[in-house]
Amino acid sequence: MEGLCFLGPFAVGNDSLTIRTPDGSVSKIENLDVRVLGPKCPLLGYTFEFDESFNMRGIIEADSRTAVICFLRFLFMGDYLLEDIHCLCRSQNTEAPAASPDDITIQDQAYYSLLIHAQLFRMGVLFDLPELQVSARANMTRETELACSQPTPPADICETIAYLYKHLSKNRELIDTVINYCVGCFSYHDLGGNPEFRQLAFDLVPFHTDLCRTNFERNFQDEGAMEILQLPAYETENGEGLTQPDALDEVFSTATSLANSPFSTPVHSRVVSLGSPYQWVDTCINAEGSGSEWDLMDDQLSNE
């Protein structure tokens, strides 16, 4: 079975694990031994029960079959990105079986997929495995850093963002890792020209809010910083642009709170009018808060 050659050196049992995924598909992983698996992940071991043949049957609901295979790989080998089992076999003085093409496909998918790392982090949370959480977080950080030197963005960047905000919204470290990539490579990877990315920014207001906030925290130094403020405006079928001002309101609120801090100095920011990327509105946010600059911005936005 694909991606499971790493189970070779371990005792082969008669137990099985049924995998149910959100798309309704059901699959099984056979020849497991709960006596070996249970101590590695007690919470997973508790899902197994005896069937009429006195074999153990377990059921797990997961985001994908690939995630479960990588999860088991981590439990048995300590690293879900190991290309094969040669290092383990060498340590046990046994001969390693040749990796099948299916194994390589699963490994490549896990190695380069941000979504798989996010899914495995969540499994680490659900099954109380801090080591898996650390590994998944480190792998996601590595992949976003590598993506900055690649000519194209990660293939599943939009899926990953949607997944993080749906299932891991309280884990700011993971979200901030992806958000900083998006801001830093917004122009280089032409994320603003990606219809799926633009639609996601429009539909997922917290995501766009975080984009604008991070953009502000980075002092608008990145290429495409002003274009980020124009998201989530996207083209409809009749060519009209739709805008979502909530994210900008969040940024202005953050800027005001920073300016009103007794430890802050006046903050100068430049905000692009939503209608034209070349019309700049100079805004001075200071502790006195005269309000005239905000009136100017309101007039600019209302005229669009």
Image (cartoon, rainbow, N blue to C red):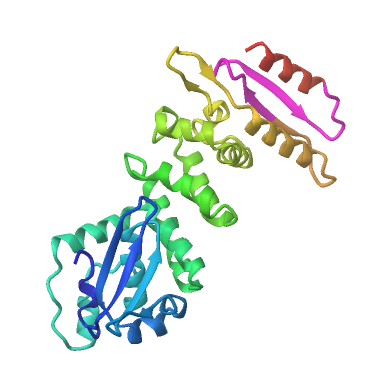
Rendered image quadrant of residue 56: bottom left
The reply to whether residue 63 is in sight is yes
Q: Is residue 210 above or below residue 56?
A: above
Residue that appears at 30% across and 85% down:
54
Q: Is residue 235 above or below residue 107?
A: above
Q: Position of residue 150 (x, y in %)?
A: 33, 44
Rendered image quadrant of residue 142: bottom left
The reply to whether residue 187 is in sight is no
- In the rendered view of the protein, which quadrant contains the N terminus? bottom left
Q: On the rendered structure, is 155 left or right of 14?
A: right
Q: Residue furthest front?
A: 52
Rendered image quadrant of residue 16: bottom left
Q: Which residues are magenta?
A: 269-291
Q: Position of residue 234 (x, y in %)?
A: 48, 23
Using the image as rendered, state which of residue 169 and residue 216 is in the foreground.
169
Q: On the rendered structure, is 178 left or right of 300?
A: left
**Does 285 lie within the magenta span?**
yes
Using the image as rendered, state which of residue 129 and residue 25 is in the foreground.
25
